[in-house]
Image (cartoon, rainbow, N blue to C red):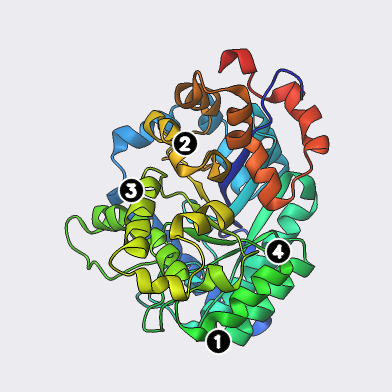
Amino acid sequence: MGRRYTVISCDCHAGATYPEGGFLDYVGPAHRELLREEMIRVSERQRVLMERLFAREFMARQDGTEAATKGGRSGAWDPARRIKELEADGIVAEVIFPDGSQDNAPPFMASAGPGAVGADHALQSVGAAAYNRWLADFVGGTPGRHAGVALITIHDVQESVGQIRWAKEHGLRGVLLPAGVGDLPFYHHPRYEPIWQACEELELPLHTHVGSATPDYGDLPGSTTLFATESMWFSHRPFWFLVWGAVFERHPRLKMVFAEQGADWVPELLKLLDSMYRNMFRHEQQRLSLPPSEYWRRQCAVEAMFLTRREVDLRHEIGVENLLWGSDYPHYEGSWPNSARCIRDALDGVPEAEARAILGGNAARIYGFDLAELDPIAARIGPEVAAI
């Protein structure tokens, strides 16, 4: 392994840029004109969102870096530039989620979940298929360096299973589960059983990620900040549904990753759920053979993205083997292009074996990355152990 860390970012983003073709090549002729119109709306919507979401001073921190001024964000759709930016940031491999910050959101609100205002279920299916095909091509050039997470829709569960099987057959390594379900039943409902079965059978981990539960906050002051405040909570929510719904009990090999939603929520939540299991609701022991914390240890992982020293200090309560790291490239709120500094600030003094697990070992196990292939790259570009 040498004296450098093999860093795998478990939260990065990619998407075809508008208007230069992009996803138009991945939808059929019947939807291309509709998608052209959608591109215009998405571009304007994204511009307004970014103006409302982040303070200019906050965005300036990244905008002023050499990596950004010289076009480093173009790696969001340019695979060659992407590898260059990752390596410059000390990262050897990554897990890719949909993007939406650079006019490159998946078509037809496919990643927004079924409850998004204005979402059309049939068009979301078209958009998910287009994004998944694009992503499979995007990661195909260097598959050992990328783990793509496929979009699925959930209004037609048999269609969902088809999307999951397509993802596996085409080299994608995970599934993005909408954090919100709109008017559909939530995830303890038996209608979703084929999804859990397919993901367990195909060894594709489920994911929730902030942004896929989008209540209507209205066009009012504070709406975007309200969304940012609640989005992480909505993304945690499927965990307790899969616990109390006995999904983890029935599917012990099913894996689930909670991405870009912090990690400090985990210890207190597990204490609460375990207390419920052992005391007031101990009758649940007739259905569940393990306390909730044991399902977490066995089957779940969390990618903090905003990894703080406090979260690192809680690593044994969260589970060292359950904790992942991510840079959120190329988003403003992530660590790019200063990931080495952020890693040092968070992990200073952590034993090397634990730091290796958090920075790359756990990701390699969950997503099937080959460390024998990645370690030589890390020996050239990874952060030095002594520097951390």
Decide which of tag 4 and tag 1 comes sooner along the chain: 1
Which residue position is annotated with label 1?
Answer: 156
Q: Which residue is mark 4?
A: 203
Can you say which quadrant of the picture contains the N terminus? Answer: top right
Instruction: Tell me whether the residue at label 1 lies in contact with that at label 3, contact meaning CB atoms closer than 8 angstroms.
Output: no
Bin the neighbour count of mark 4 within 10 Å (Cα to Cα): few under 14, some 14-19, many 20 and up.
some
Q: Looking at the image, tell me whether mark 4 or mark 3 is earlier in sequence order.
A: 4
Spot the residue most to the left.
221
Can you identify the residue that label 2 sits on? 315
Q: From the image, state whether disc 1 or disc 3 is nearer to you.
A: 3
- Residue displayed at 54% across by 67% down: 248
**Amino acid at circle 3:** Glu
Q: Residue 4 at x, y = what percent?
A: 69, 21
**Element at badge 3?**
helix
User: Where does the image place residue 82, in percent across and percent down from the top left?
Assistant: 66, 41
Point 72% across, 55% down: residue: 138
Q: Which mark is residue 311?
A: none
Mark 2 and mark 4 residues within 8 Å of each other at the beta carbon: no
Please tell me which residue is depicted at 77% across the width and 30% down the height of the picture: 375
Q: Is residue 167 visible?
A: yes
**Disc on res. 268:** 3
Quick check: 291 above or below 162?
above
Can residue 27 be seen? no
Viewer-closest of 49 and 114: 114
Residue kind at label 2, given as amino acid type: Arg
